[in-house]
Image (tube, grey):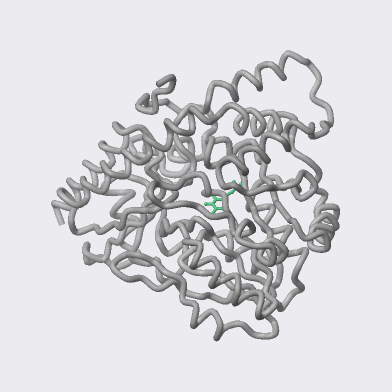
């Protein structure tokens, strides 16, 4: 194996949000950050090589996006998901979150209702509200730690004002990889009720066997024509800093509405280096990616076993996808507001408060296991020590 994910890479001093914000916020360099969703692994060498090659040219004016950029992504989607995409369907966004903002603005007007399935990635709430729309929650049901969509409730909450549902697939923070059957159920309800399906598939590549990610738009023509798929290499290859995402819209009428909104939002194409990074990732990143998946799966098994044997008061269901664990901390018998202090100040491990993802997440913390095993082990031992003192 050419890559060692075991190497502990020091990110401090690289203006890294995850590690450098610790000192700027808490002035405590002991804290281990396992919060924001990026990983502590070096990216594939081929990405660095491609960027270095581009740097040999000393001018960085406005760029065109080359055909090879599209080809690389189209090949990746086909190989990974058997999803056939045409170049014309691929539109740019400077990140999935900005893309979602443009999408909401393009297809809704203030006062419209947008459904999200909670607990869910927190910017979904703010994007909807900041566009003047109303958040309507279809709370996920939870059986033995496994979350499911509530289809009966979904049908009930749709009104004439409901214009859109935003799906998170795979789902951050609960780690579900939705099955084809589940996606079909939600897709059919939306077609029947004229609701546009926007699918954030940024975690699509981070899926553990035997689970399989199905691209919503690949299920059938009707779904392809009633959906917008948001993808990016950002999570997969740890290149979120390049701010490059792909918004894929098969339906020409919907695509033109997005293009119009892009103009209003002054969004053009990928940055010079963002385009280079994405193309290199999708062209040459396969071997690194396979190694990553093996390492992440090992981290998940390691962490789950640790909690099970040594910190059984905290319960976790094995995630089907994402490198994020959803920790049920109700067994600690703390008030929700005490949880974050406990992890941050006592354990000195920085997690995300579950309440960020919705009121039903109050007794949870989200843990990012995308780091070297030594860092993970140290964080887990700290949590164990403090839980034992309770
Ligand atoms: C579901 C989901 N969507 C989008 C993003 C952020 O995407 P981007 O950095 O491309 O805006 C994240 C990051 O954690 C995420 O988990």
Q: Is residue 314 above or below residue 14?
A: below
Instruction: Depth check: give the residue in front, 138 or 10.
Output: 138
Instruction: Classify residue 180 as left or right of residue 218.
Output: left
Q: Is residue 78 above or below residue 195?
A: above
Figure quadrant of residue 280:
top right
Instruction: Depth check: give the residue in front, 43 or 291.
Output: 291
Instruction: Depth check: give the residue in front, 68 or 133.
Output: 68
The residue positioned 51% from the left and 59% from the top of the image is: 121
The residue positioned 61% from the left and 33% from the top of the image is: 282
Figure quadrant of residue 165:
bottom right
Q: Quadrant of the C terminus?
A: bottom left
Instruction: Depth check: give the residue in front, 143 or 223.
Output: 223
The residue positioned 51% from the left and 44% from the top of the image is: 205
Q: Position of residue 89 (x, y in %)?
A: 76, 50
Instruction: Classify residue 273 as left or right of residue 371.
Output: right
Q: Position of residue 209 (x, y in %)?
A: 39, 47
Q: Position of residue 325 (x, y in %)?
A: 36, 52
């Amino acid at each position: 194996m050419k890559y060692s994910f075991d190497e502990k890479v020091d990110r401090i001093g690289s203006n890294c949000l995850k590690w450098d914000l610790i000192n700027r916020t808490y002035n405590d360099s002991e804290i281990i950050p396992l919060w924001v969703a990026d990983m502590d692994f070096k990216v594939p060498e081929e990405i660095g090589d491609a960027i270095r090659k581009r740097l040999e040219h000393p001018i960085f004016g406005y760029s065109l996006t080359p055909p090879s950029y599209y080809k690389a992504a189209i090949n990746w989607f086909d190989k990974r998901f058997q999803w056939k995409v045409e170049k014309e369907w691929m539109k740019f966004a400077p990140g999935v979150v900005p893309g979602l903002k443009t999408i909401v603005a393009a297809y809704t007007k203030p006062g419209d209702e947008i459904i999200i399935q909670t607990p869910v990635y927190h910017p979904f709430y703010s994007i909807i509200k900041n566009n003047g729309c109303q958040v309507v929650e279809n709370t996920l049901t939870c059986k033995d730690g496994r979350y499911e969509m509530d289809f009966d409730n979904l049908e009930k909450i749709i009104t004439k004002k409901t214009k859109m549902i935003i799906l998170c697939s795979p789902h951050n923070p609960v780690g579900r990889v939705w099955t084809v059957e589940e996606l079909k159920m939600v897709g059919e309800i939306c077609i029947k009720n004229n609701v546009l399906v926007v699918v954030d598939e940024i975690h699509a590549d981070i899926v553990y066997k035997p689970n399989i990610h199905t691209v919503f738009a690949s299920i059938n023509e009707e779904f392809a024509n009633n959906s917008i798929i948001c993808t990016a290499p950002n999570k997969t290859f740890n290149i979120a800093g390049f701010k490059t995402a792909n918004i894929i819209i098969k339906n020409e009428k919907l695509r033109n509405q997005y293009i119009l909104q892009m103009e209003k939002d002054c969004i053009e194409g990928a940055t010079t280096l963002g385009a280079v990074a994405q193309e290199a990732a999708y062209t040459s990143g396969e071997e690194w990616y396979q190694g990553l998946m093996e390492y992440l799966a090992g981290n998940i098994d390691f962490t789950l076993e640790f909690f099970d044997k040594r910190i059984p008061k905290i319960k976790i269901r094995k995630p089907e996808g994402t490198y994020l664990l959803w920790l049920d901390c109700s067994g600690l018998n703390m008030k929700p507001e005490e949880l974050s202090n406990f992890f941050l100040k006592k354990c000195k491990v920085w997690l995300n408060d579950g309440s960020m993802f919705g009121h039903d997440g109050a007794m949870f913390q989200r843990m990012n296991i995308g780091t070297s095993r030594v860092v993970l082990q140290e964080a887990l031992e700290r949590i164990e020590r403090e839980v034992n003192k309770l």
